[in-house]
């Protein structure tokens, strides 16, 4: 069994955070009315994609009725619809849809994960919960970092956690890490490896419905990621 597969199983059985454990399980029992006939996953959600990615996409946490329902990150909700359509257009996914864990979706040179692995109330994990989950992020990072050329951070939380992760692993930023904004860019270097980190607004409904994030804006980020990988 591969180390990533073992890690994914360990993540999915984690119960470190009492509040998050209670919430994710409550959501899985109460359910959304439109999914009342479905069995919810109701557990932490591991990363998804290839084991040697060139692109890593980092989000905040699973969606209550998306990944917390389907068991696969960014799957079964509108945020996932936006993300996987963009990945497909950029050549990082074999199909533009992500409905359930058995829908045939495969990523190409890419992996997707979240900094926090359980759905938090109001999408706001506490500092302690963030730190508890950081051990899973670090372990997954250690397994996949070797071939990475680019990271796309979805939202300010992911941007901050990604920067902290790289700095803690002794990567050097070639310039001051900028504050989060859409299409913010910073490059990190360690020995001969260069990793470009790109910021994007999260494809949540509050951003997509208000047009704060549009599909052309989202596509530009993944076009930059594709160029970085091609030139690395």
Image (cartoon, rainbow, N blue to C red):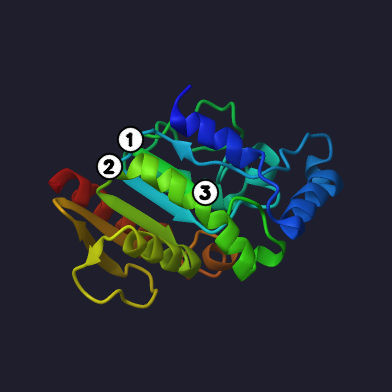
Q: CA distance from mark 3 to mark 1?
A: 17 Å
Q: Quadrant of residue 40?
A: top right
| Residue 4 seen anywhere in this rendered image of the structure | yes
Along the viewing direction, whichever of 57 and 104 lies nearer the viewer: 57
Task: Point out the tag, 3 or 2, that comes first from the N-terminus.
Answer: 3
The secondary structure type at the circle numbered 3 is helix
Residue 98 at x, y = what percent?
Answer: 54, 38
Task: Point out the tag, 2 or 1, that comes first from the N-terminus.
Answer: 1
Q: Quadrant of residue 169?
A: bottom left
The secondary structure type at the circle numbered 2 is helix
Residue ID for mark 3? 136
Residue 199 at x, y = what percent?
Answer: 37, 64
The secondary structure type at the circle numbered 1 is loop
Residue ID for mark 2? 146
Residue ID for mark 1? 52
Report crowding for label 2: few under 14, some 14 to 19, many 20 or more residues within 10 A (C-alpha).
few
């Amino acid at each position: 069994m591969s180390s990533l597969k073992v890690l994914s199983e360990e993540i999915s059985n984690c119960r470190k955070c009492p509040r998050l454990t209670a919430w994710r399980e409550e959501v899985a029992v109460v359910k959304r009315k439109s999914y009342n006939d479905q069995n919810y996953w109701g557990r932490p959600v591991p990363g998804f994609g290839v084991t040697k990615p060139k692109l890593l996409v980092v989000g905040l946490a699973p969606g209550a009725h998306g990944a917390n329902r389907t068991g696969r990150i960014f799957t079964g909700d509108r945020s996932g619809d936006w993300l996987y359509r963009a990945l497909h257009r950029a050549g990082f996914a074999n199909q533009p849809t992500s409905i359930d864990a058995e829908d045939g979706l495969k990523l190409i040179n890419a992996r997707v994960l979240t900094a926090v692995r359980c759905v938090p109330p109001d999408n706001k994990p506490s500092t302690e919960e963030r730190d508890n989950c950081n051990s899973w992020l670090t372990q997954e990072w250690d397994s996949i970092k070797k071939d990475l050329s680019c990271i796309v951070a979805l939202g300010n939380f992911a941007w901050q956690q990604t920067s902290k992760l790289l700095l803690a692993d002794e990567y050097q930023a070639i310039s001051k890490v900028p504050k989060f904004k859409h299409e913010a860019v910073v490059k990190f270097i360690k020995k001969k490896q260069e990793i470009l980190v790109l910021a994007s607004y999260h494809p949540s409904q509050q951003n997509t419905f208000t047009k704060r994030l549009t599909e052309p804006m989202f596509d530009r980020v993944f076009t930059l990621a594709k160029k970085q990988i091609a030139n690395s």
